[in-house]
Amino acid sequence: MGMGKATAMVFAAAGASVVLADINETMGRKAAEDIKHNGGKAHFVKTDVSNSESVKNLVAETVSQFGKLDVAVNNAALTPDKTPTGDFDEAYFDRVIAVNLKGPALCMKWELQQMTKQGHGGSIINIASINAFKPQYNMPAYTASKHAVVGLTKTAALEYGAQGIRVNTIAPGAILTEMSAASLKSIGTSHEAFADVSYLKRWAAPHEVAQGSLWLASDAASYVTGITLPVCGGYSTR
């Protein structure tokens, strides 16, 4: 859903054969069917990104279905926590780190192994958050995980650049998604109450973030690796 679904649809529209992965099988299969209904090539694999064997299976099924893995967008995340650092929920902190940080790490582990085996490079895009630059109140686990994703990206870019594998990060700002709506609802507010979230005075649509991932995946970004691209309407420069 949200940015993940929008990214899959944007890539499919650009001609990519897309594998969608989610722990929610019902929504994942529907998203894949929507892509196929619009003439795209799509396949769904139920995946728990916090589980290594599940992610390993995802990559194996991708190769089985389409023959290779050229591009990966690692987007799965949990809704931000909502307590101050001095009073954080330890159980939820562990869940956020497992999905938001360990998830991209496991995805990269198996993606990098496959791309290395193929021997013709590749592009990996990790989805962080503007929280990686500008912390928000009462989100210690979410903010820590997104900071760490940036460091993880830089490390992989350094290690695998000589093999032609580019690794970059997208840092979305205020994006209209189901997750952002749930996060705002949890603190008793809504999108409409926060119009001043960018220089453009609006929230972004998920497909606008997806276009950043598409560019980083493409040959147009062939000399771009190890960077974090803010897609935030200027918010990161405040």
Image (cartoon, rainbow, N blue to C red):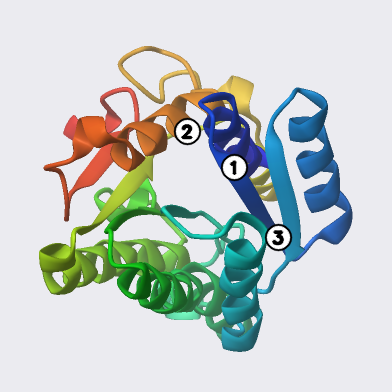
Of 204 and 27, nearer the camera is 27
**Residue 30, how many percent across, how many down?**
85, 43
Kindly tell me whether residue 47 is visible in this rendering: yes
Where does the C terminus fall, quadrant-wise? Answer: top left
Q: Compute the Cα span from label 1 to label 3.
A: 17 Å
Nearer to us of marks 1 and 3 is: 1
Secondary element under disc 1, as helix, strand or loop, is strand
Q: Do the CB atoms of the residues marked 3 and 2 lie less than 8 Å apart?
A: no
**Residue 145, how many percent across, how many down?**
39, 69
Q: Residue at x 59, y 32 (%)?
A: 12
Q: Compute the Cα span from label 3 to label 2.
A: 17 Å
Kindly tell me whether residue 50 is visible in this rendering: no
- Which amino acid type corresponds to the residue marked 1 in the rendered image? Ser
Of 209 and 44, nearer the camera is 44
Which residue is farthest top?
A: 200
**Residue 55, how many percent across, how many down?**
59, 76
- Which amino acid type corresponds to the residue marked 2 in the rendered image? Ala
Q: Residue at x 55, y 23 (%)?
A: 205
Residue 121's image quarter?
Answer: bottom left
Q: Earlier in the sequence, mark 1 or mark 2?
A: 1
- Which amino acid type corresponds to the residue marked 3 in the rendered image? Asp
Of 212 and 71, nearer the camera is 71
Q: Which mark is residue 101?
A: none
Is 232 left or right of 6, judged from the image as shown? left
Nearer to us of marks 1 and 2 is: 1
Of 140 and 227, nearer the camera is 227
According to the image, label 2 marks what residue? 210
According to the image, label 1 marks what residue? 17
According to the image, label 3 marks what residue? 22
